[in-house]
Every structure is written in C-alpha cells, then in structure tokens.
Image: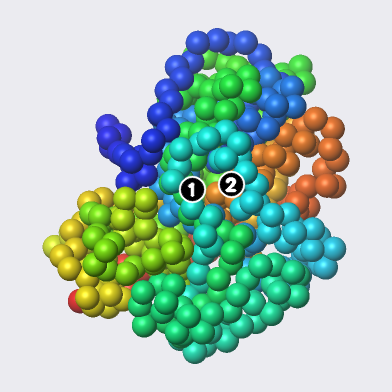
C-alpha cells in the first residue's frame, strides 16, 4: 500500500493531482516510461511539435524524484564550469553550460506562461561556504561564472549573514538566475499542459517488457501491449530492471528533507529574501522556506525513524545551530528520495537500441535537467540531429563496485546524521 502523501509537496501542491487510467491501446509515435519532470516535459514539448505521445507512469505523477525534490531551481551542473570543460572538451562544455545556464529562466517562463501553481520564487539560490576551504572553492566558481557573463555574486560573510539570517557561513555564492518551487506543483503543472497539448498520460502502469516487431516497439504491462515507433525511458534514479544493465550505470543515493510547521517570520529572520541554500560540505545540507513559512532542511541520506526519531532530532539540532534564537520547532513532514550519481558527476544519454533512448544520472539537478531533456528529445524526434544533443550519446558503462559504494555511502550518511543529531 502506497503512502497517502510522499512528501510535503505532495500534500501542499495547489495544482490538482492527475490520475489517468489506461483506456486505449491505440499506437503512438512515442511512448515515454516515467511521469516525472523528464517524461512530462517530453510529452508537452513533443505534443506541441505534433507528436502523438503516451506517458506511462507506474505510480502517480511525480511519485519518484520529481515529487520528493528539494525544489531548488539551479543553473548549470553540480560541477563548476571549469571542471565541465576538462571532462567534455571546450566546445561541448561551452554549449552545455550555456544551455543549462538559461534553463532556470526557461522553467520560470513555462510556469508564468501556463500559470502553473507551484510557489515559484526567482530570487536566486545561495551556495554557502561552510569553511574557508569551501569559500576558496566558491571563489573559483564565481570567477569562472563571471567570466562567462553569468549573474552571480560572491558574498562576504556579513552579506551571507544578512541574506540567510545566520552567522554560520564564511561567505556564499549567490546565483541570481535560480530560485525555488514546489516541485510537485510544477510536475503536476507539466502534466496539465501536456494533456492540453494533446499528449496522453496513464498512471498505475508498470511496464514489464520491451521488444520490437516490424519496426515498432512493443511495450508490455500485464496482458496489455502498446506499440510505438520510439520509446523514451525517463526513470533516472528510479530505474528498475526493465532494460538489462541500465540501473548499474549509476550509484543510487538517498536525499532526505524534513519540514517544520510554519515559523513566525515577524519574530525570526530565516532566509528573509526567500533564497534557497545549500552548503559546500562534503555531506551537504540544504535549507529553504515554502510560501507558508515552513523551513525545509535536508541532507544526503534517508529518513531514520528509529533511535527516537533520529532524523527529526538531526533537523532540530541543525536548525538550532544555525538559528539559536528560534522558538519552538515542530516537525510537520519528513521524506526521502533517490538521486542517480555518475562517477564523473555528468548526466548521460544512452541509445539503448534503435529508437530507444534514455537520459540518466542527473546528479541532483532534476528540475532544470529534466525540463531540458524533454525539450531536446522532442526536437530530436522531429528532425534534429543526434549530434545536436546536449552531450554525446555514450554506451552503457556499469559502475564498478556500485553496490559496495552505495552501502558505504549509506553508512557514512547515517553516521553523519547520528553525530549531528546529538
């Protein structure tokens, strides 16, 4: 039995939930497996370009990372631009960095154009220096972003204190392109506009098998089969065994979030300008507010309900360290989701077979990356060359020692959570 609400965002989103029961076996141009940012962006953009697209979601819209996301709409990749250059080469890196740099504005423009109810706030996000070493890293990032003409500002410790309300940081990097949303509201909005554009969406459909016959893909679930010329697997960190070897190409980690009840913002100055925040720690944490004044604090790892609600104690202790003056802190909601991490921290595009594609390994940047991939796949399927994709298509490459890495990271995150809950 699935939980009633998978996250705070699921409970608080103003956009209506969508449940589309399977009603037709009509063939499609494109079948998309996965009803998150990527799948629904593909459906919207593809339908706008005249494609007949059918999205199949195993659970509910936004059930995976899209509905469990922290909701930071960030520009660029997890890596700084200079590292992307080293890994992809100057030409490919420059194009990708430019594209991703524009994606927050594109996301917010979609929200505005279609009046998606998702608490959109485009005041920027702050990458906060937890140490002097972290500040040095941010200085290098700032120099490169500013060289590229991006509207980013390196903040002093006092400027960071003014914008965050805490003295705990040595400085910060403010990216004025970025912002925050209710991610479940956004993904439901994408479903709404995809349907309006002519796409079909069926929920509660768990795809079990993919085969080809007479040049068409046969997509099987239970006794049913749907046919399409092209299939897009848009499952990212929630990839299962549908395609052999695919889930072995990334390391799955958890990220958890804990939401408080609303604070009295007249008494307590926490992120007074509405910025989202994450820090430079190796095991990073994030902090933001929703429009009702709830604080949402998160970090790498999963919710630990035992040991006297360890995760909730972690949240309260960390909020007290940041904001000693806070009054009573009550927890309203706690959840975690999956992130697909690749060894080089770059997402990938795989062509698994003719007319079968998957983008995967978003490394925690799902909102802008998923929206982008939906747009570029729609363009690819209506005539754009594969060579114009954001990154080159690469073959599957399993992560060596993947399960060991996942287990070690899970242990490290749990230990970190325990220590910081004391």
Residue 327 can be seen, yes or no: yes
Residue 223 percent coordinates (x, y): 49, 14
Residue 32 percent coordinates (x, y): 61, 30
Residue 56 can be seen, yes or no: no
Whole-number angstrom distance, CA of label 1 to CA of label 2:
7 Å
Quadrant of the image containing the N terminus: top left
Residue 161 percent coordinates (x, y): 41, 79
Q: Is residue 271 left or right of residue 94?
A: left
Q: Is residue 368 left or right of residue 29?
A: left
Image position of 375 with respect to 207: above or below: below
Seen as rendered, the residue at the extreme front is 266
Per the image, the residue denoted by label 1 is 120
Camera-side residue of 95 and 290: 290
Quarter of image, res 53 = top right
- Check whether the beta carbons of the residues at disc 1 and disc 2 lie within 8 A of each other: yes
Camera-side residue of 163 and 360: 163
Q: Residue at x 51, y 64 (%)?
A: 125
Q: Residue at x 78, y 47 (%)?
A: 389
Please tell me whether mark 2 sits on a helix, a strand or a loop.
helix
Which of pointers 1 and 2 lies earlier in the amino acid sequence?
2
Give the label on residue 108, or none. 2
Please tell me whether mark 1 sits on a helix, a strand or a loop.
loop
Q: Residues within 10 Å of mark 1 (few under 14, many from 20)?
A: many
Camera-side residue of 223 and 292: 292
Quarter of image, res 264 = bottom left
Q: Residue at x 57, y 40 (%)?
A: 112
Quadrant of the image containing the C terminus: bottom left
Residue 18 percent coordinates (x, y): 43, 25
Image position of 345 with respect to 375: above or below: below
Q: Residue at x 82, y 43 (%)?
A: 386
Camera-side residue of 220 and 337: 337
């Amino acid at each position: 039995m699935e939980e009633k609400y998978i996250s705070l965002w699921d409970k608080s989103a103003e956009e209506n939930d969508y449940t589309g029961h399977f009603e037709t076996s009509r063939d499609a141009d494109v079948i998309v497996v996965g009803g998150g940012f990527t799948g629904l962006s593909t459906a919207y953009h593809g339908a706008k370009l005249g494609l007949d697209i059918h999205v199949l979601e195993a659970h509910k819209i936004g059930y995976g990372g899209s509905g469990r996301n922290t909701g930071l709409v960030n520009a660029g990749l997890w890596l700084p631009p200079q590292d992307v250059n080293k890994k992809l080469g100057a030409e490919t890196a420059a194009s990708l960095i430019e594209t991703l740099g524009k994606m927050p504005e594109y996301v917010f423009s979609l929200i505005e154009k279609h009046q998606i109810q998702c608490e959109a706030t485009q005041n920027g996000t702050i990458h906060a220096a937890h140490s002097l070493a972290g500040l040095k890293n941010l200085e290098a990032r700032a120099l490169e972003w500013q060289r590229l003409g991006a509207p980013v500002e390196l903040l002093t410790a006092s400027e960071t204190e003014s914008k965050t309300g805490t003295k705990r940081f040595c400085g910060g990097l403010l990216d004025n392109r970025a912002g925050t949303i209710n991610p479940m509201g956004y993904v439901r909005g994408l479903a709404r506009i995809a349907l309006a554009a002519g796409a079909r969406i069926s929920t509660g459909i768990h795809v079990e098998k993919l085969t080809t016959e007479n040049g068409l893909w046969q997509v099987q679930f239970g006794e049913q089969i749907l046919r399409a010329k092209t299939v897009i697997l848009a499952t990212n960190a929630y990839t299962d065994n549908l395609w052999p070897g695919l889930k072995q190409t990334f390391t799955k980690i958890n990220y958890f979030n804990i939401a408080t009840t609303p604070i009295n913002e007249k008494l307590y100055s926490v992120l007074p300008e509405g910025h989202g925040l994450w820090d430079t720690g190796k095991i990073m944490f994030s902090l933001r507010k929703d429009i009702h004044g709830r604080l949402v604090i998160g970090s790498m790892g999963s919710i630990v309900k035992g040991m006297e609600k360890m995760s909730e104690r972690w949240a309260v202790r960390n909020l007290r360290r940041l904001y000693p003056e806070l009054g009573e802190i009550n927890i309203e909601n706690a959840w975690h989701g999956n992130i697909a991490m690749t060894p080089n921290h770059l997402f990938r595009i795989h062509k698994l077979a003719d007319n079968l594609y998957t983008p995967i390994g978003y490394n925690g940047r799902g909102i802008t990356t998923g929206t982008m991939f939906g747009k570029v796949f729609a363009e690819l399927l209506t005539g754009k060359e594969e060579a114009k994709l954001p990154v080159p298509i690469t073959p599957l490459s399993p992560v060596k020692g993947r399960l060991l890495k996942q287990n070690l990271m899970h242990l490290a995150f749990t230990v970190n959570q325990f220590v910081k809950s004391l």
